[in-house]
Image: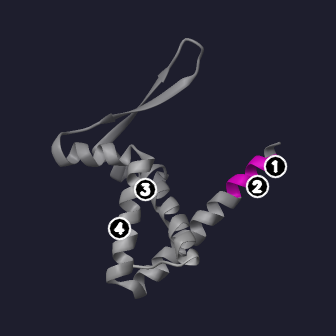
């Protein structure tokens, strides 16, 4: 399979957005809560630390580990989008475009917000 640079860039932004959706976005918290629990502890200096406790065993624990690791989820998201692109290209191109635009918009918003805070 040969992929051009535009497709690579779009796919990269799409994977970025899809992985963030699963690992960090509030809308997916109910899904994540089935596989792991977020715990907060306050240290002696008053800093709040958040850590994850994986639930269950076997496949449930595996998915919990996967959803707690942005890098791991990103690999699986990339695989999913690549397989979709190979099997159902007409639908996948629109999904990838949607996620890529949302991913780039999120990056721009973060940069703008940080700039305005300075």
Between disc 3 and disc 2, whose residue precedes? Answer: 3
- Is the residue 72 above or below the residue 86 in the image? above
Q: Is mark 2 on a helix, strand or loop?
A: helix
- Is the residue 105 above or below the residue 57 in the image? below
CA gap between label 4 and label 1 equals 36 Å
Q: Is residue 113 magenta?
A: yes
Give me the residue at 58% from left, 22% from top: 47
- Is the residue 99 above or below the residue 63 in the image? below
Q: Badge 2 is on which residue? A: 112
Q: Is mark 3 on a helix, strand or loop?
A: helix
In front of the other: 96 or 51: 96
Q: Badge 3 is on which residue? A: 74
Magenta range? 109-116
Q: Residue furthest left?
A: 58
Between disc 2 and disc 4, whose residue precedes? Answer: 4
Between disc 3 and disc 1, whose residue precedes? Answer: 3
Question: Which label sits on residue 116?
Answer: 1
Q: Badge 4 is on which residue? A: 80
Specify how the rendered protein is coloured: one colour
Q: Is mark 4 on a helix, strand or loop?
A: helix
């Amino acid at each position: 399979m040969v992929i051009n640079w535009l497709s690579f860039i779009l796919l990269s932004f799409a994977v970025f957005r899809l992985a963030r959706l699963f690992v960090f976005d509030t809308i997916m918290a109910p899904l994540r809560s089935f596989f792991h629990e977020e715990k907060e502890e306050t240290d002696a200096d008053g800093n709040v630390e958040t850590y994850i406790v994986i639930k269950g065993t076997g496949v449930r624990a595996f998915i919990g580990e996967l959803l707690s690791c942005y890098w791991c989820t990103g690999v699986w998201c990339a695989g999913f989008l690549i397989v979709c692109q190979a099997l159902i290209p007409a639908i996948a191109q629109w999904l990838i475009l949607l996620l890529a635009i949302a991913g780039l918009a999120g990056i721009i918003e973060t940069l703008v917000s940080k700039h305005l805070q300075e």
